[in-house]
Amino acid sequence: MIIGKTNLGEYPVLLAPLEDITDSAFRSICRKHGADMVYTEFVSSEALVRSALKSSIKMIFEEKERPIGIQIFGNNVEAMRNAALLAEQNNPELIDINFGCPVRKVAMKGSGAALLNDIPLMMAITREVVNAVKVPVTVKTRLGWDENTKVITDVAERLQDVGIQALTIHGRTRAQMYSGEADWTLIGAVKANQRMKIPVIGNGDIDSAYKAAEMFNRYGVDAVMIGRAAIGNPWIFDQAKAFISRGEIPLLPDLSERIAVSLAHLELAIQKKGGHKGIIEMRKHYAGYFKGLPGFKKIRLEILTRTNFTEIQDILMNLA
C-alpha cells in the first residue's frame, strides 16, 4: 500500500489514533514491535490556531516513529486549513482528518463523527485542507451517524473526488460508540466499489492476529488499523504480520518480556513527559500488559499509589 511517497508494504498493520493513548512513548513502542505506521492523538484545530501548547506538543514526534500521520479535527473550514498548515510544518508523512470520533465532547460540538450529519461541510473542510498542504491528506470516519444513515459508500466516493489519498473506515456508526460488533460489510463494499482507486483501511474489533488476517482475506482491504487492542499489547502488530505473511502461529510474550517492555514504556513516558506526568499517564497501560496474570488486579492497585520509578520497577520485577 502506497500513500503519497510512503510505501507501507503488503498487508500493513497500523496503529489507530487514540486520544490520551497514542503519545510519543506509546508510538515508539508500537513501531518497535511492528506497527507499519502510527498516528498522533487527535489535535483540535481551534486549539492549534490559538497556539495552545498542549495541542502543539501532540504534534511533536521523533524520527524513529516514522512513518507517522498527524490527525486533526474541527468543524470550521478556515481553522482546519490553518491547523493543517501548522501540522505540515512538523513534516509528517500525512495529515489525517478525524471525521469519526464519537465522544460527546467532540461530536456534540459539531466535530468528529458529527460531520456525518453535514456532508457538504465535511467536503468543504476536506477540499480546503487538501488544497492547502503539499503532504497527502487522508480521512478517518465511520459508517454513518446511526443505523438509518449509513452513508459511507457515497461519502467515500465524494472524499476521493475532493482529493484524499486514503480512507480509514471504522465499522460502527456514531450511535454505537464502541458497543456491539463492528460491521465490516460496508467497509468491504467501499473497497469493492470499482470507482474507488485510493487505499481503503479497515478498523474495528481487530483484537488478534487471526482477526487481522480474516479482515484482509474476507474484505480485501488495503490495510487494517488496530486501536484499543494494542493498549498494553504492542506485540499484536508483529504477531499479525507474522501470521498474515508466513502463517506463523502467534506466541504470547512471556512474563519477563511483558515486564521488560512495560518498564521500557514507562521510562520513555518519564523521559518525554517528566517523572510525575509520565508515571500518571502510564497507569492506563498496565492492565493490558499484564492481562490474565493471576492476582494482578491487587498489584495494579498498589502500582497506582506509587509516584516513583524505582518503586514501580521493584513491584514489576518481583512479578517474575
Image (tube, rainbow, N blue to C red):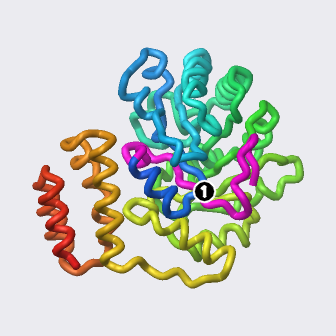
Q: Give how far across and how far down residue 189 sits, in percent.
A: 77, 57
> Of residues 148 and 82, which is closer to you in this image?
82
Q: Amino acid at mark 1?
A: Asp
Residue 151 seen in the current view: yes
Which residue in the protein does label 1 denote?
36
Q: Quadrant of the N terminus?
A: bottom right
| Secondary structure predominantly adopted by residues drawn in magenta | loop
The secondary structure type at the circle numbered 1 is loop
Q: Quadrant of residue 86?
A: top right
Is-magenta flag for residue 5? yes
Q: Residue at x 58, y 56 (%)?
A: 14
The image shows residue 201, relative to residue 206, as above or below, that is: above
Q: Residue at x 33, y 59 (%)?
A: 264
The image shows residue 193, relative to residue 261, as above or below, that is: above
Q: How busy is the neighbourhood of tag 1: few (under 14 within 10 Å), some, or many (20 plus)?
A: many
Q: Quadrant of residue 136?
A: top right
Q: Give how far across and how far down residue 135 sits, in percent.
A: 69, 31
Q: Give how far across and how far down residue 41 sits, in percent.
A: 46, 41
Is-magenta flag for residue 17? yes
Residue 148 seen in the current view: no
The image shows a total of numbered marks equal to 1
The image shows residue 95, relative to residue 225, as above or below, that is: above
Q: Quadrant of residue 191?
A: bottom right
> Of residues 217 and 26, which is closer to you in this image?
26
- Residue positioned most to the right: 194
Give the side of residue 282 with respect to residue 217, left or right: left
Q: Residue at x 32, y 63 (%)?
A: 262
Write the start and end of the magenta stretch as one range.
1-24
Give the side of residue 214 with respect to residue 17, left or right: right
